[in-house]
């Protein structure tokens, strides 16, 4: 039976995100009205969409395309997080600046490849404490 979802959420595999209840935060912050959303979970979120290796980028784009063909979500939601080991930047301000730049570049790439979709981007703050808040960037 055909099934559709509200969004594709791309986020990091860091277990602190699970422990803090990232899926509930997505609903609480009204990004989706319930937990009917696809997820792609990988170290650093979709950071590898900016890889210099075209095979890695192609793999990511193929995965997104496949999920869209299955579930026809209208939007992609990028959620990066603070103190991310995949970034390895100890200064929180520098990390946020770098992640914000990456998220903008990834949004542009996804908008070119999947023009039917909107892209929203956030940085999840409070990873260390589990007291999560989402900052739209
Ligand atoms: Zn991470």
Image: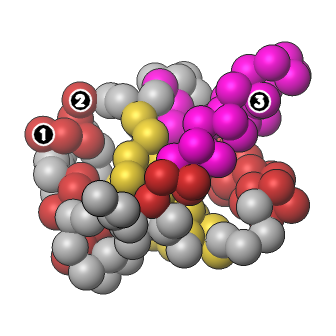
State the SS at label 3.
helix
* SS for callout 2: helix
The numbered mark, 1 or 3, whose residue comes first in the sequence reads 1
Q: Is mark 1 within 8 Å of ligand 1?
A: no
The x and y percentages for residue 71 are: 45, 59
**Left or right relative to 49: residue 24:** left
Give the image's coloring scheme.
secondary structure
Q: Main secondary structure of the magenta part?
A: helix
Q: Which residue is mark 3?
A: 57
Rendered image: mark on residue 19: 1
Separation (CA) of disc 1 from disc 3: 29 Å
Callout 2 touching callout 1 (CB < 8 Å): yes
State how far apart marks 2 and 1 are (Cα): 6 Å
Residue 57 part of the magenta-drawn span: yes
Between 37 and 11, the one nearer to me in the picture: 37
Instruction: Residue at 75%, 61% (x, y): give it.
Output: 114
Left or right? Give the position of 21 relative to 108. Answer: left
Q: Nearer the viewer, residue 104 or 93?
A: 104
Location of residue 125 in the rendering, given as x and y in whole percent from the top left corner? 36, 55
Residue situated in front as seen by the camera: 122 or 4: 4
The reply, left or right, for residue 130 in relation to residue 109 is left
Q: Which residues are magenta?
A: 43-67
Point 15% across, 48% down: residue: 20
Looking at the rendered image, the disc whose residue lies closer to the viewer, 3 or 2, is 3
Q: Quadrant of the C terminus?
A: bottom right
Q: Residue at x 26, y 65 (%)?
A: 36
Q: Say if the magenta span includes residue 42.
A: no
**Chain-order first, disc 3 or disc 2:** 2
How many C-alpha atoms fall within 10 Å of the one at disc 2: few (<14), some, or many (≥20)? few
Quarter of the image where one finds residue 83: top left
Quarter holding residue 131: bottom left
Mark 3, ligand 1, within 8 Å: the answer is no
């Amino acid at each position: 039976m055909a099934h559709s979802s509200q969004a594709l959420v791309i986020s990091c595999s860091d277990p602190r995100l699970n422990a803090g209840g990232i899926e509930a935060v997505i609903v609480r912050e009204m990004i989706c009205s319930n937990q009917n959303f696809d997820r792609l979970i990988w170290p650093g979120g979709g950071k590898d969409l900016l890889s210099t290796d075209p095979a890695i980028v192609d793999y990511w784009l193929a995965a997104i395309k496949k999920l869209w063909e299955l579930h026809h979500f209208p939007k992609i939601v990028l959620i990066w997080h603070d103190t991310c080991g995949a970034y390895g930047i100890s200064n929180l301000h520098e990390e946020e600046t770098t992640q914000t730049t990456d998220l903008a570049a990834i949004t542009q790439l996804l908008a070119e490849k999947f023009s039917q979709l909107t892209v929203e981007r956030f940085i999840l703050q409070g990873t260390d404490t589990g007291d999560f808040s989402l900052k739209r960037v």
